[in-house]
C-alpha cells in the first residue's frame, strides 16, 4: 500500500507510515470528512485535525491562489525567448482541435492534424445524430454517477451544438481555430482546480502538465491576436 500523504510504498500492512509517521486511519478519516462536506480544501481546521492534513490543506490553498498567476507570468516570459516555438506547437495542437471540434458541432467530419485540419464541406445528419447521441449518453452516465459537473458540461455542449447548427459553418470553423484554442487552453488551466477526490488532483504529473500546456498555449495565442508578437519581432529588426 502507498501512504496517502507522502506516497511511500509499504510492503506490509501497517497502521502508520514508516516515512512521514501519519496514522492511516486518522488521516483518511479527515480526508473523507472534507470530501463529504463538498470541499476541495478545508475552510476551517481544528486542533483535532491531523497535522499532515492541515499542512496539505494550507499548501493546496497557496497553490490555488498563486500558481495560475505565476504560471501565466512564466509563460509570458517564455514567449519572449527561443522556447516560444515549443509553445507555438502546443498552441497549434489546440488550434487544430478547435477547428475539428467546431466542424463536428456543425455536422461535418474533420481530422485534426498538425498545421491542417481536413473537414467536410457539407453537413451530414449522421454525424449530427451520432454526436448528439454521444453527448446525451455521456450526460446520462454522469447523472447516474451523480457527477453533476459533467452533467452540466454535457448540457452546455448540447446547447453549443444547437447554436453551431444555426450559424454559418465555414466562418465558424475558421474563427474557432484560434478562438477554440483559447477556450481549450482555459479549460486546461481550470483543471488545476479539480476537486480533491478527482483523478486529476491525484495525478501530480497530469495536473501540472495540463496547467503548463494551457498557460503556454493561451499566452501564445493571446499575443498573436493582440499583435504584440509581431510588433516585438519588428522592433528587434
Image (spheres, rainbow, N blue to C red):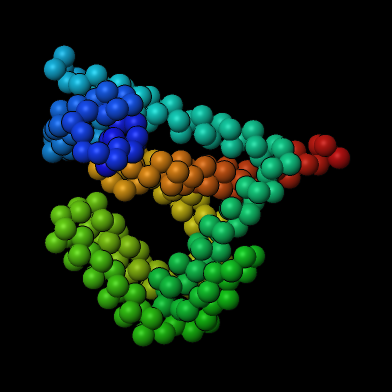
Does residue 213 appear left or right of residue 128 in this picture?
right
Above or below, 139 against 129 in this view is above
Mark yes or no: residue 214 visible.
yes
Q: Position of residue 90 (x, y in %)?
A: 59, 53
Which quadrant holds residue 76?
Answer: top right
Write the residue at 30% across / 72% down: 134
User: Along the line of sight, which residue is nearer the eye, 105 or 53?
Assistant: 53
Write the residue at 33% across / 70% down: 162
Which quadrant holds residue 32?
Answer: top left
Does residue 2 appear left or right of residue 140 in this picture?
right
Write the residue at 13% across / 17% down: 48
Which quadrant holds residue 96?
Answer: bottom right
Mark yes or no: residue 186 visible.
no
Above or below, 57 against 219 in this view is above
* Image label count: 0
Write the residue at 29% across / 27% down: 18
Does residue 158 appear left or right of residue 210 in this picture?
left
Above or below, 207 against 64 in this view is below
Q: Position of residue 17 (x, y in %)?
A: 27, 29
Name the quadrant of the C terminus: top right
User: Along the line of sight, which residue is nearer the eye, 174 or 187?
Assistant: 187
Q: Position of residue 83 (x, y in %)?
A: 69, 42
Q: Position of residue 2 (x, y in %)?
A: 30, 39
Q: Residue furthest top?
A: 47
Amino acid at each position: 500500500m502507498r501512504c496517502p500523504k507522502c506516497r511511500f510504498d509499504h510492503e506490509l500492512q501497517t497502521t502508520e507510515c514508516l516515512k512521514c509517521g501519519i496514522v492511516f486511519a486518522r488521516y483518511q478519516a479527515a480526508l473523507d470528512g472534507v470530501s463529504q462536506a463538498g470541499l476541495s480544501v478545508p475552510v476551517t481546521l481544528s486542533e483535532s485535525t491531523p497535522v499532515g492534513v492541515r499542512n496539505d490543506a494550507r499548501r493546496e490553498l497557496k497553490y490555488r491562489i498563486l500558481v495560475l498567476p505565476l504560471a501565466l507570468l512564466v509563460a509570458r516570459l517564455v514567449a519572449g525567448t527561443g522556447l516560444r516555438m515549443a509553445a507555438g506547437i502546443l498552441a497549434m495542437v489546440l488550434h487544430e482541435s478547435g477547428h475539428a471540434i467546431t466542424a463536428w458541432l456543425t455536422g461535418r467530419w474533420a481530422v485534426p492534424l498538425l498545421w491542417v485540419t481536413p473537414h467536410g464541406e457539407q453537413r451530414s445528419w449522421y454525424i449530427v445524430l451520432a454526436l448528439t447521441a454521444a453527448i446525451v449518453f455521456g450526460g446520462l452516465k454522469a447523472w447516474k454517477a451523480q457527477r453533476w459537473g459533467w452533467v452540466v458540461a454535457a448540457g452546455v455542449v448540447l446547447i453549443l451544438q444547437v447554436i453551431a447548427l444555426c450559424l454559418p459553418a465555414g466562418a465558424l470553423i475558421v474563427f474557432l481555430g484560434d478562438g477554440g484554442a483559447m477556450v481549450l487552453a482555459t479549460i486546461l488551466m481550470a483543471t488545476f482546480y479539480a476537486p480533491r477526490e478527482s483523478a486529476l488532483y491525484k495525478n501530480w504529473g497530469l495536473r501540472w502538465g495540463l496547467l503548463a500546456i494551457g498557460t503556454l498555449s493561451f499566452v501564445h495565442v493571446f499575443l498573436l491576436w493582440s499583435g504584440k508578437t509581431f510588433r516585438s519581432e519588428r522592433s528587434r529588426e
